[in-house]
Amino acid sequence: MTGKTTWAIPEGYIPEESTGPEPEMISHETVCFLNTNDEDAAVEITIYFTDRDPVGPYETTVPANRTHHIRFNDLEDPEGIPKGVPFASVIESDVPIVCQHTRLDSRQAENALLSTIAYPDPD
């Protein structure tokens, strides 16, 4: 099995503005999941802020032997994630998965893309 069951992404920020065609070039944060198991992964995401209580869990399923990408901009239940506000996330899965974090910042016409592997709990 590849991956871990708990991941942390300490950096998160959804820019308030975007440049370019929608939806492709909307400024966003994304978490990318890889599930190499033969069973689906039940995943929960909890969002942390600098000045208020955490929100979550946001729930999703990553099918067996598949990848799944979620834009933090699209998370709505239990509530939407505000734009222009720093946040962090903790991801918990019932089977080992791999997580990667990506941000597209298109506030300027010269776009910036950031991608990094999340921090896995060493178990």
Image: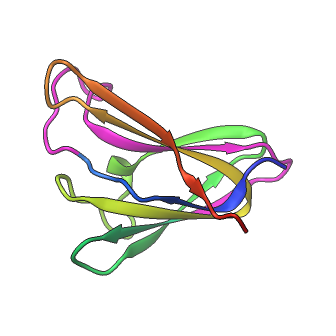
Magenta span includes 110: no
Looking at the image, residue 85 sits to the left or right of residue 116; the answer is left
Q: Is residue 16 above or below residue 50?
A: above
Which residue reaches farthest bottom?
Answer: 53
The image shows residue 1 at horizontal and vertical percentages of: 85, 49
Looking at the image, residue 100 sits to the left or right of residue 121; the answer is left
Count of marks overlaid on the render: 0
The image shows residue 111 at horizontal and vertical percentages of: 24, 23
> Residue visible at 36% across and 44% down?
29
Instruction: Say which of 118 and 52 sits in front.
Output: 118
Query: Which span of residues is magenta-colored?
Result: 15-44
> Residue visible at 73% across and 51% down?
3
In the rendered image, which quarter contains the C terminus?
Answer: bottom right
Q: Is residue 34 above or below residue 12?
A: above
Instruction: Say which of 106 and 64 sits in front.
Output: 106
> Residue visible at 48% across and 40% down?
116
The image shows residue 6 at horizontal and vertical percentages of: 63, 64
The image shows residue 18 at horizontal and vertical percentages of: 17, 32
> Residue visible at 25% across and 79% down?
52
Q: How is the image coloured?
A: rainbow
Q: Quadrant of residue 54?
A: bottom left
Magenta span includes 42: yes
| Main secondary structure found in the magenta portion | loop
